[in-house]
Image (spheres, rainbow, N blue to C red):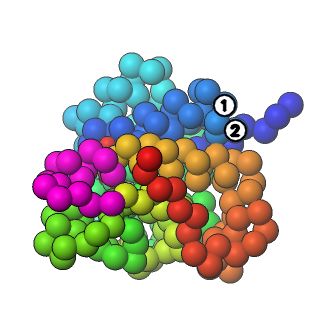
Amino acid sequence: MERSLPFAVLISGRGSNMLALARAASEGRIAGRLAVVISDQPAAMGLVEAHRLGLATDVVEAAGGTDRATLGRRLTEILERHRTELVALAGFMRILDAGFVQRWQGRLLNIHPSLLPAHRGLHTHRRVLAAGDHQHGCTVHFVTEELDAGPAIIQGRLAVRPGDTEESLSARVQQLEHIIYPRAVGWFAARRLQWKDGCAMLDDRPLTSPIIEDAQ
Ligand code: GRF
């Protein structure tokens, strides 16, 4: 029987990337199964969508003074219960502690709305406009302890247009996100993408720079 990788998606909000991953798995573009959708926000829109699709969901208790290490342990408990082999962060708005990152190292991906290493952190569309950048996009990368700094795997790239706003950029970047994240997870599920000694490897070759997908 063909192997189907159980993966998890962690969200805090809308969950459009989670839906793109769920769709890719159900259409066979990812040789995997979305085993659980986890949120730190009980009211996240993405959880409603996940329920609608009949996916397993869970909410990680993160109220009040929950420290990062406790949050990380609770997440790992849920992930292990679902026999997760890959964790995809998709708009999960919590910083993960070192223990969690080490536990899942090489099996932990994130999508970030900029062409990393440019514009790590928040408000990337605003910062692209303020800097007068000509190009913008999104990056799927392996997660390491340093925020938004792990090895990049694939980037979606677009040209900034005159008159672009944060909203117009965000909409075009998201279209690219929904292409590149399923592609990266598909590579991982097919064992084409691997983590080796701190490097991203694609088809047994180190990715010295990310694969680029240009917007049409
Ligand atoms: C995306 O823009 C992603 O790059 C960032 O958070 C956003 C999540 O959007 N990390 P959604 O919840 O997947 O729609």
Q: Is residue 17 magenta?
A: no
For image coordinates 17% across by 55% down, the residue present is: 164
For image coordinates 32% across by 34% down, the residue present is: 46
In depth, the one of 70 and 208 nearer the eye is 208
- The CB of the residue at mark 1 lies under 8 Å from ligand 1: no
Residue 20 spot, x, y in % from top left: 46, 36
* Marker disc for residue 16: none
Q: Amino acid at mark 1?
A: Gly
Could you tell me if residue 112 is visible in this image? yes
Relative to residue 162, is residue 78 depicted above or below? above
- Tell me how far mark 2 sits from mark 1, CA to CA: 6 Å
Give the residue pinned by disc 1. 28
Q: Is residue 193 left or right of residue 11?
A: right
Q: Is residue 172 magenta?
A: yes
Residues at discs 2 and 1 in contact (Cβ within 8 Å): yes
Q: Amino acid at mark 2?
A: Ala
**Quadrant in which the N terminus is drawn:** top right
For image coordinates 25% across by 50% down, the residue present is: 170
Residue 71 spot, x, y in % from top left: 36, 59
Give the residue pinned by disc 2. 31
In depth, the one of 210 and 123 nearer the eye is 210
Callout 1 environment at 10 Å: few (<14), some (14 to 19), or many (20+)?
few
Magenta range: 159-173
In depth, the one of 17 and 76 nearer the eye is 17
Callout 2 environment at 10 Å: few (<14), some (14 to 19), or many (20+)?
many
Could you tell me if residue 83 is visible in this image? no
In depth, the one of 27 and 125 nearer the eye is 125
